[in-house]
Amino acid sequence: MWRTVGGEESRLPSREFLMGTDKPGIAADGEGPQRPVHVDSFHMDIHEVTNQQFQSFVRATGYITEAEKFGDSFVFEGIVSEDVKSQISQAVAAAPWWLPVKGANWKHPEGPDSNITDRMDHPVIQVSWNDASAYCSWVNKRLPTEAEWEFACRGSLKDRLYPWGNKLNPKGQHYANLWQGEFPAHNSAEDGYTKTSPVMSFPGNAFGLYDMVGNAWEWTSDWWSVHHTTDHQHNPTGPPSGTDKVKKGGSYMCHKSYCYRYRCAARSQNTPDSSASNLGFRCAAEQKR
C-alpha cells in the first residue's frame, strides 16, 4: 500500500471468483444467479473517500455538487433537527423516513444547521454518482465496476455473506457500522454510532479494505440490471446503458428487518444525480498508472 493524493490503496490480485448468490436475501434486487467472473488486478482505495479528501477536491477545482445545485437532498428523518423537520411538508411515500431537506449537501449532511467540522475523517456523503465520478477523475482514478467492488468486498472468501465470514458479530464484536435496534424508531447504537463513523473504525478484510459494508453506500460504475448471464465473464462492466447506477455495501441505516443489504452479494440502485445522507463512494484504478 502507499499514499497518493487520492488516498491509500490496496493492490488486488487478478483472480476468478463467484459473483452473486443462489440464496438471495432480496431476490428482486438481482442478487443471483451465482456466476464465475474473472477480474484483472486493480487498485482499490482502502477506505471510503472522506470529507477531508473531498474538501481538497472542491477547494482545488471549485466543483459544485448536484445537491448544492438542486438546493436540497434526502436525509434520514431520525437525524434531522426538530427545527428543520418543522419546515418540511412532504416525504417519500414508500419510505417516510426519507425527508427532502433544503440546504442539505456534503458540507451540511443533515441540513443547514449541520456541518462536518468534527467529521473530516468520516466518509463524504450527499454525493451523486456524477459527483463521485468527477472526484475520481481528479485523482486519476475511477469508480470500481460492480464486479470489482464485490470481489474486493469478499476478500478471497468463497460463499460468505460478509467481508469477514458468515456471522454478523463474531465473538460478540461489531465488524461494521450498521443499525442495531428497531428500524426506523430506535437505533441503540451498540456499535458506537447512530450516523457515519470515521473510516477504518472497524476491522479490515483480508485485502486490507475497510467499511466495505456498512457506514455509507458506495457507488459503482455499472448501470443497473437485475438480469445476469451465467456465462463466465472477464472484467464485466454491466449493461451498456440504463437509468440507474448500482450501489453496494449498505450503510449505517441497514437492518435485517428492512434493508438486508450489508452483504457482499447485495445491491441497490439510484439515479446518477441522486444523493442522500448515507451515500458515498471509494475509487479504484488500473494496475498500471
Image (cartoon, grey):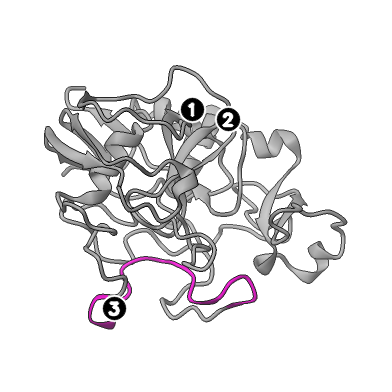
Disc 3 marks which residue?
A: 173
Residue occupying the point 75% across, 50% down: 100
Query: Label 1 vs label 2: CA separation?
Result: 9 Å
Residue occupying the point 23% across, 81% down: 171
Query: What mark, if any, has residue 80 been given in the picture?
Result: none
Query: Label 3 vs label 2: CA separation?
Result: 40 Å
Query: Label 1 vs label 3: CA separation?
Result: 36 Å
Q: Nearer the viewer, residue 204 or 116?
A: 204
Residue 76 rendering spot, x and y as whole percentages: 65, 60
The amino acid pointed to by label 2 is Tyr
Q: Earlier in the sequence, mark 3 or mark 2?
A: 2
Query: What mark, if any, has residue 134 been given in the picture?
Result: 1
Residue 85 rendering spot, x and y as whole percentages: 80, 64
Q: Nearer the viewer, residue 225 or 123?
A: 225
Disc 2 marks which residue?
A: 63
Marks 3,2: beta carbons within 8 A: no
Q: Is residue 15 left or right of residue 55?
A: left
